[in-house]
Image (cartoon, rainbow, N blue to C red):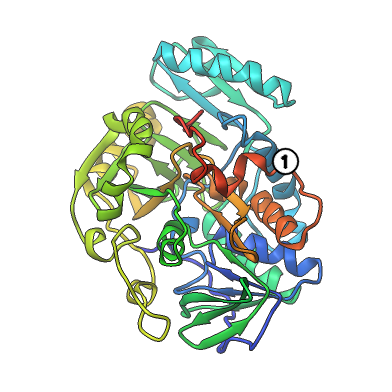
Amino acid sequence: MTPPIPSIDSAARIPPQADVVILGGGMAGIATAWHLARRGTSVVVIEKGRVSAEQSSRNWGWCRQQNRDPRELPLAQLAIRIWETLNAETGEETGFVRSGLVYASNNDADIATWEKWGKIAHGFGVDTRMLSGAEVSARLPGNSRTWRGGVHSPTDGRAEPQLAVPAIARAAQRAGAVIVENCAARAFETTAGRVSGVITEQGLIRCSAVVVAGGAWSGMFLRHHGFRFLQASVKSTSFYTMAAPAVTEGGVSMQDVTLRRRLDGGYTVGLSGQGQLQITPYGLLQAKPFWPTFKLRRKGLTFGIGRQFLDGPEAIVRWSADGISPFERTRILDPKPDAHLVAKGLRKLQEIYPALAGIRAAESWGGMVDSTPDAIPVISSVASQPGLFIASGFSGHGFGIGPAAGQLAADLVRGDKPCVDPKPYRYERMIDGTNLGKPGML
């Protein structure tokens, strides 16, 4: 089920025009709107369902630099600095705390990877520290396992997904942004080769730029207009618990389970590297570029065929701008959680932390984690279509880096100096023959 999300005051009708129209009310779209509105750009966010109802409220809530791909590190570093100011900037509680994150493993390959990553990260000024087995145990009191080693990132933190995006959305509204929920975008229009408007189910909004920030749905919208966008989704399962004893105030990643302390005294729990790959038409068509990623993740995946085959983001569907689109047929992508993974997570928690004996899940949910082949997002203009921008493909990292991703997207839309080097996030790498290889980190 959809996690509980505070509502926002949605506009009832679309305005006739704006400088920029953003498609998608998740973290990427809302953060972009906030940064644009603060600079005086008129912006409208079109959301087919509810703000933050899909993956932006279904993630673990980690705000990390640790184990980021080096190409993504500058964005992650900027995001942490923005997270620190968000409560003050929005006047609301986002749940952000620099509580530190600990990774622990009994796998020599994991430890070697972290050591290699640390040498790169230190060059960026990231505070990351390798831990011996004894040091891991000291960092994780009450943890019953004996560890080979780990890594600690003391300046990383956590936030509350169900609180943060609505808080930023309301701040964007106060700055002048218009947000329209339960309104799907069907297509964009062009005049003299340039974006000139967005056709929604309520009618046309005239604009000079559109930002596609639709999460797992971005690829479908872009393919409708003839733009190739490499994007594949895996169904994940997460849950949060009732209030329980404090075994950590931050986040802990272990080989088979993760946990993150919540403001309400419970834990958000994830199953590391485990999910279901649903067989879909477009998924089969783009299997080749995703093969290296698939080989890395194969061990933790199960397979299935369900509704996603016919009406999910990777279905092959055609529609017209004056007819009902797939985005109206699925207002909120809400896959069922896998009960066996919830049971497994609860069992593992209690095995690892005896103090959590009897812990129960309060809510569980499924989510579609969309990824690019290299696990790096696209935050970019589209050179062949003036006025078209993309902020999508965040590969499970979008919540944590979202505040900075929105700033970069706003910079590019306005033509301002980019806050970080935008080259790693360019769209054209998907279509110009660039060897995308495999993800640097997952």
Q: Which residue is mark 1?
A: 421
User: How far across and down, in percent of the image, does residue 252 sit?
Assistant: 49, 32
Query: Residue 31 or 168: which is nearer the viewer?
Result: 31
Q: Residue at x 34, y 47 (%)?
A: 236
The residue sitting at the left extreme is: 305
**Residue ID at (44%, 65%):** 221
Is the residue marked by circle 1 packed among few (<14), some (14-19), or many (20+) residues within 10 Å? few
Between residues 327 and 86, which one lies in front from this camera angle? 327
Estimate the x, y position of residue 239 in percent, counting from the top left. 37, 49
Q: Quadrant of residue 90?
A: bottom right
* 202 with respect to 18 (left or right): left
Which of the 4 quarters of the picture holds residue 75?
top right
278 shown above or below 101:
below
Residue 241 seen in the current view: no
Most foreground residue, 395 or 335: 395
| Image position, residue 289 (x, y; %) | 38, 38
Q: Of helix, strand and loop, which one carries label 1? A: loop
Q: Residue furthest front?
A: 192
The image position of residue 256, as x and y in percent, is 35, 30
Query: Which residue: 44% across, 11% down?
Result: 148
272 lies left or right of 125: left
Q: In the image, what residue type sits under mark 1?
A: Asp
In the rendered image, the quadrant that contains the N terminus is bottom left
